């Protein structure tokens, strides 16, 4: 297969981790006879420095016409610490999500036995944890109407959802559940919120189209406990934007390192793949950042291309490095390997050199 | 001192755990020369069964004129499982909160070294954890305007806050921080929500009146991680209604048992004290429920009466039972003691018989 990928290296450690993913994708291409071509584009602080615009038109155009976007990270302290800055790196990503109509953020939570000691949870609670969270990304209270009265004494944020917004992401979550352990948990607050009751109604109605998927419903406050108490009960979690923000971040700490966690954002247009970690500017250029979050994001991209075997080979390679102790400094402060060495090892594993 | 207390035993295990608190309060009264009198009132399923009303007027009247309310638990499955039920036990508590204008829910999170093994978190993360969460209870999205359009295709929930609503709970939280480790963390989502920006503005302005308190600000998605990763960083957490619902429930699992956790709800009128656990109907009448959540709620009531030494004696007695292995079945399924025995032991400790 031929696939054209827009690569946005971004800021901080973005370039060095994304370069490892390119290595890995090229190795997959060679082994499986695919041709991946890359269109490198700018976004974030890097784009502001070079063009004055956090998201140049060229970047959007490239993303719209390629098969997927692989993105590193965004953000630089020189903008964060300047309250007068009119353009901010983060604006680039928000605008890109909007341009690509990315309505679903997908985060798998995977636990590696060799890293149990890094998790805040006891090992027993971590066994068999394997979930994926579908967070709605373009609706809800983050995007609703905001008001502040003239006197500045009263503020409001409106949370709105339509059936269409709920249905499109629910279909994605149900389909993924069918490929997994066939369980879907809707996280809401239907005892209190009208929008949650609409989510529940839509999911109940769709459930009949996915008769092989068991559906359950959990209030968000209970979910925040259950993710710690008994995370293995979850297979696919579906939830609205703000609840998804909170519980996906909560769940992401279970694995023991944010540096391992990938994500995909999919929608009507081209899908985007990025590690959940930030630009971590203190580590930039030092070849110490963990590239696994980016490499597993590339694996999610391969799944998106329906290259399921290829994606699994990448995951196997990652699992092999972790259990062999080939890890970066965030995982093991004493015995560790550089960003590029981890990339090389995963490439070599894929090319059967190991 | 003389204090008149409205006691609402409520449903399920409510009566048997609350009776232990009465024992403890009477022991404190005897030892310290206070006179506690009790006015027993109905609420919940118990009240529906006896009067048809989940919150009889008499109960409200008693609460309004007494010095504090001690409440057990509410809810019965015969109402939960009947979707046609017009009156529900929970309506009683919601209406009482409104009648008493209870705008702040206060939940201390205490960790007992002898119970580390019950926590989902590793012991290392539990050391020195000692926080209290102030959750706004009458505003925000749970109480905002709700809409569903005629076609049933679009729903909304409005989140509204006024400066007054924020100030009154912020003062309580700042004052408590002054009595504690002098740190206050506002949990919000000020990068996205207008209401959160108002919370932040109000807290920033009040901070100058409490110069001895260090204030920091944390986004709610980060807070959901930090509560697991590094809970000891928190002293007093202040937050709005829904964020408080989610993170106070999340934090409550750290101690290893929901049965241990007390709460206070305070406002313009009489304050109400209750364990955070529910009515747990399966255990009702078996003398196996954990009375510590209720007894520590009674200790919070003593603090509210400014009987600080007395409250501390109750807490010392509780800590002594836990470290001595005098615990209920939820804490130790093999070697355990009955609800009433734990109450007796705590009473005897207070009376210096132990
Ligand atoms: Mg987040
Ligand atoms: Mg709750």
Image (cartoon, coloured by chain):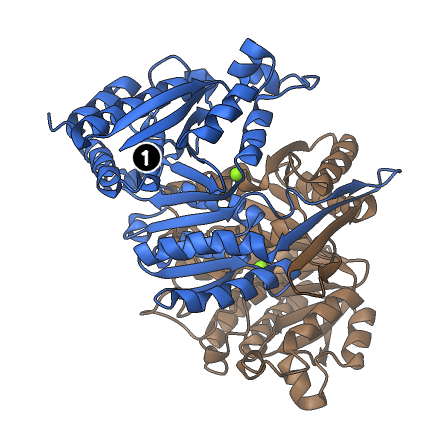
Chain colours: A blue, B brown
Which x, y percent locates residue B62? 79, 75
- Chain for mark 1? A
Residue at x-position 16% and y-position 24%: A348
Judge by depth and name the residue closer to the eye, A186 or B109: A186
Q: Name the residue under label 1.
A: A296
Residue at x-position 33% and y-position 30%: A3
Q: In this view, does B155 lie above or below B229?
A: below
Q: Quadrant of the N terminus of chain A?
A: top left
Which x, y percent locates residue B315? 56, 57
Judge by depth and name the residue closer to the eye, B51 or B13: B51
The answer to whether residue A66 is left or right of residue B78 is left
Q: In this view, does A64 lie above or below B110?
A: above
Judge by depth and name the residue closer to the eye, B179 or A217: A217
The answer to whether residue B46 is left or right of residue A154 is left
At numbered mark 1, what does the secondary structure look like: helix, strand or loop?
Answer: helix
Which x, y percent locates residue A115? 28, 38
Q: In this view, does A173 lie above or below A261?
A: below
Please indicate, yes or no, whether residue A65 appears anywhere in the rendered image.
yes
Judge by depth and name the residue closer to the eye, A281 or A132: A132
- Which residue sits furthest top? A50
Which x, y percent locates residue B234? 56, 39
**What is the quadrant of residue B275 in the picture?**
bottom right
Tell me if the residue at label 1 has its CB under 8 Å from ligand 1: no
Q: How many numbered discs sit on the rendered protein?
A: 1
- Which residue sits furthest bottom? B50
């Amino acid at each position: 297969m031929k696939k054209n990928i827009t690569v946005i290296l971004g800021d901080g450690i973005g370039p060095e981790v994304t370069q490892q993913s390119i290595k890995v994708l090229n190795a997959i291409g060679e082994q499986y006879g695919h041709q991946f071509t890359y269109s490198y584009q700018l976004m974030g602080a890097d784009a502001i420095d070079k063009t004055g615009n956090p998201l140049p038109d060229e970047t959007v155009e490239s993303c719209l016409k390629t098969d997927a976007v692989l993105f590193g990270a965004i953000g630089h302290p020189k903008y964060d610490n300047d309250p007068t800055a009119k353009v901010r790196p983060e604006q680039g990503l928000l605008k890109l999500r909007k341009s690509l109509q990315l309505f679903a953020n997908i985060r798998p939570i995977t636990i590696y036995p060799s890293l149990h000691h890094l998790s805040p949870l006891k090992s027993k609670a971590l066994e068999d944890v394997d979930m994926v969270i579908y967070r709605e990304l373009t609706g809800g209270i983050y995007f609703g109407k905001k008001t502040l009265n003239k006197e500045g004494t009263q503020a409001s944020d409106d949370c709105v959802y339509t059936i269409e917004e709920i249905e499109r992401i629910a279909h994605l979550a149900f389909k993924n559940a069918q490929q997994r352990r066939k369980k879907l948990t809707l996280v809401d607050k239907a005892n209190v919120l009208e929008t949650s009751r609409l989510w529940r109604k839509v999911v109940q109605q769709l459930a009949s189209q996915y008769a092989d998927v068991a559906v359950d419903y959990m209030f968000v406050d209970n979910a925040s406990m259950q993710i710690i108490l008994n995370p293995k009960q979850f297979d696919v979690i579906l939830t609205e934007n703000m609840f998804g923000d909170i519980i996906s971040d909560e769940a992401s700490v279970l694995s023991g390192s944010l540096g391992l966690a990938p994500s995909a954002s999919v929608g009507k247009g081209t899908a985007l793949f990025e590690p959940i970690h930030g630009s971590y500017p203190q580590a930039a250029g030092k070849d110490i950042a963990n590239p696994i979050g980016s490499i597993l994001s590339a694996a999610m991209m391969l799944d998106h291309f329906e290259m399921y075997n290829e994606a699994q080979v990448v995951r196997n390679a990652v699992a092999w490095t972790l259990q062999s102790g080939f890890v970066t400094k965030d995982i093991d402060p004493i015995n560790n390997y550089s960003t590029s060495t981890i990339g090389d090892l995963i490439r070599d594993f894929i090319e059967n050199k190991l």
